[in-house]
Amino acid sequence: MKKEFKKYIPWIVLLVIILSLSLWYLLSKRVTQEQIDQYGLKIEEAQQYTEARQYSVAMDKYYEAVDIVPKKVEAYEGLIDILILKNRIDDAVEVVEKSAKPLNNQDRSVLYERVGDGFMQIGKYQEAYDMYDMGLVLGVKNMSLELSLGKVFLKLGYIDQAKDQFEKGGYEGDEKAESILLLSYIYALEDQTRAKKTFETVDPSESMTAYYEELQSVFDSLNEDSKFNATKLSRIYVNNGYPYLAIKLLEPIKEDISEYLEGMYFLGRAYFEFGNYEKAVETLDGALTLGGMETDILWTKGRAYMLMNDLDNMERSYDSAIGYAGSNLNEDLANEYIDILLSNKQGLKASELIKNLLQLLPDEPFLNILAVKIYDSLSEDVKVDFYLNKLSTLTLTDSQKKEYLRWKIGSMIDGEESIDNYLVELENLDKFNPYYQYFLAKSQIKEEENELAIQSLERAIEYDLSYQITQEASKLLSSLR
């Protein structure tokens, strides 16, 4: 009997070791209440730092939370949101694909959707599709992700696949309302009666009401004129970000609408928005011969030529668009064209343009701000001072006031005159303004308060989401360290 027992001793020992290791592994992976509490505190701290726009510190707090509980999703969501905000979307992809591996498939699908939404915001639809697809191949139910996939199919021009997504059951609340709205858009391409019946099956929430009322207004106005009906619908498609639907609707009747101004304009805009710039220019040229909407048509042509790298035709189109606008000049059009000219080192042409515009609209604040910007790029300080003085006499919006103060302080920062009052004004308007922090740092350096200047420059870089001042602030920061 003893001999028999001795024979099993090694196996018993091995079994005990295996059970002990298994128990140790399970206990080591168990999340304690203390860890959950610590995780919650780190998340709360990270959110507070994010609200204060101290993004680097916030990210550190999120990473600390990940170290405490790697299997909870909130910290990864916070990291991804900050990276997208800071235009570091490739780093956000890396977080999902590498750092977030401990998460379950459901949570990872949420993160893939979040990154996909980031790509959608910047118009990178193929990359958005890749992210949504990665989230769905995980084999989980995520109806929000299903809806996002349908929307990116529409952006890419895959109408049948989009329709399949929107026809799926399981959507609820706003997601259901949006899926029905987009399904109605698709049905309206061929059967407007069916589209209207589908659209009327949902009572939209407040966030979707404006879109439903817009489509209802179009349905109510439809008549026997198919060209009129198609143009009305195409306006909705283009303005709401789905240009391929407008192309699908208008392209087959292009010859029929060749004498129909709005139809040709929206088809041209749809081609442009979808990235078919040559067809856009050709179609918009046809619209231009009909008379009317010249500013809108030429503005779109200018954008198309710019993306085709045809700078001569781009300039002619923008010049003509501004010429037709006259005293009804659109601020975005003027800003856009001046920015293009300055980025192409055409400051003299920009100065000639602004001179002509100011003869027509001498008291227009945004034109005087543009004049400051142009003459600053040409190092014509006397003219910069002239237009800054003019701006000080005009009524400005808060946004224009911030621009004025940015240029005013910038013109004074290296002189002897005090900028303190202007800095206070800018801080009161926007304490997160990166230029405020940058100018504050330069003022602190004058007072030999280098440690405070370092902190201000760090904040300037943190707050500069559009990277307007980051390079200069970084150079100055390096010189202080």
Image: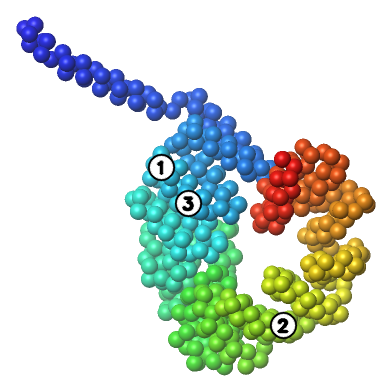
> For the residues marked 1 and 2, what is the alpha-carbon distance in whole angstroms?
53 Å
Residue bearing mark 3: 93
- Graded by Cα atoms within 10 Å as few (under 14), some (14 to 19) or many (20 or more), the crowding at tag 1 reads few
Along the polypeptide, which appears first: circle 1 or circle 2? 1
> For the residues marked 3 and 2, what is the alpha-carbon distance in whole angstroms?
41 Å
| Amino acid at pointer 3 | Val
Q: Residue at x 72, y 82 (%)?
A: 319
Closer to the camera, 224 or 237?
A: 237
Q: Is residue 30 visible?
A: yes
Element class at badge 2: helix
Residue 313: % across, % down:
64, 84
| Amino acid at pointer 2 | Asp
Q: Which mark is residue 101?
A: 1
> For the residues marked 3 and 1, what is the alpha-carbon distance in whole angstroms?
12 Å
Residue bearing mark 2: 319
Instruction: Give the quadrant of the C terminus.
Output: top right
Residue at the far top in the pictured view = 2
So how many labels did they put on this image? 3
Residue 434: % across, % down:
73, 51
